[in-house]
Image (spheres, grey):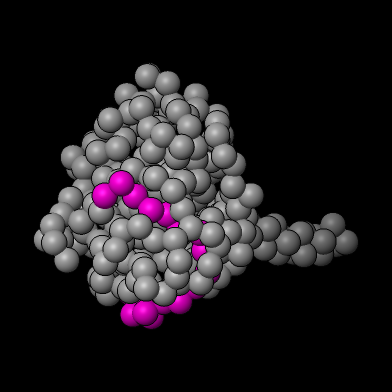
Amino acid sequence: MKTSSLLYPLATLLMVWLAGCATQSSPRAGFSVLVFSKTLMYRHASITNGIAAIQKLGMENGFFVEATEDASWFTSTNLARYKAVVFLSTSGDILNDEQQSAFQEFLEGGGGLVGIHAAVAGDVATEGGWPWYGEALCAHFTNHSAIVEAAIDVEDVRNPSTTTLPQRWVRKDEWYNFVASPRGKVRVLASLDETTYKGGTMSDDHPVAWCKQIGRGRVWYTALGHTEASFAEPLFLQHLLGGIQVAAGSKPASFQPNSATR
């Protein structure tokens, strides 16, 4: 009788434990994202915060996150496990020729790329010597301002990465300048108002977030995210979450490029 009476509490505990395991594993039922943060040049202190923030977004929003700085993960077989790859303030020539080929195949074949801050193309940013990457991002980094407060104007209020933002979003960051505006090649989601800070070089057309299609894949980029504090800002995290969802194809978005002139 004693043995029998113990079976019921044990069975109950087992059911609770299994339910807990199912809850912890539930993000795997959605989609998987790879966060890649390899740096060969400047390394942002915010990378650690960024990885933790994206992992938390995954747990809260039903997707699974893995993180690595090992470029050997970039094979066709391994990349097929993911809906999107996040380049988190990467820098330098982070992929060799074979890895570049695998990533290009992944993206053009229907995968997604989320580029954050230094992930933009450029000789002192990411993959400055890879022409395809420059065409995928549609912008090349030149320099940046100090960390200052500036105003961002949201241009696409329907995109999942900007729909929760105020139309005029004032925040502090390090603001990137580019060789030329990507407008006309991408769908601009948000732009900087250069009259609100010092250090801008792009006059009245200074995009800071955009998306585009490449082959059957999706690219989403934000120039925001230099500071460690960025990855604790609720609005920035909503911006980033929407970008991941757009790149992964889990939420619909328009990729229709803007007119070349603002």
Image coords of residue 165 (percent x, y):
39, 76
* Residue at image coords 64%, 49%: 45
Residue 224 in the image, given as x and y percentages of width and height = 45, 59
Name the residue rendered at 19%, 62% in the picture: 254
In percent of width and height, residue 101 lies at: 32, 24
In the rendered image, the vertical position of residue 79 relative to residue 44, given as above or below: above
Residue 104 x %, y %: 29, 31
Q: Quadrant of the N terminus?
A: bottom right
Magenta region, residue range: 162-180
Q: Look at the image and tell me whether residue 24 can be seen.
A: no
Q: Nearer the viewer, residue 3 or 91?
A: 91
Instruction: Please indicate, yes or no, whether residue 140 appears anywhere in the rendered image.
Output: yes
Classify residue 66 as left or right of residue 77.
right
Front one among 4 and 143: 143
Using the rendered view, name the quadrant where residue 56 is placed. Answer: bottom right
Per the image, is 178 magenta? Answer: yes
Residue beneath the point at 45% across and 40% down: 125
Q: Is residue 120 left or right of residue 212?
A: right
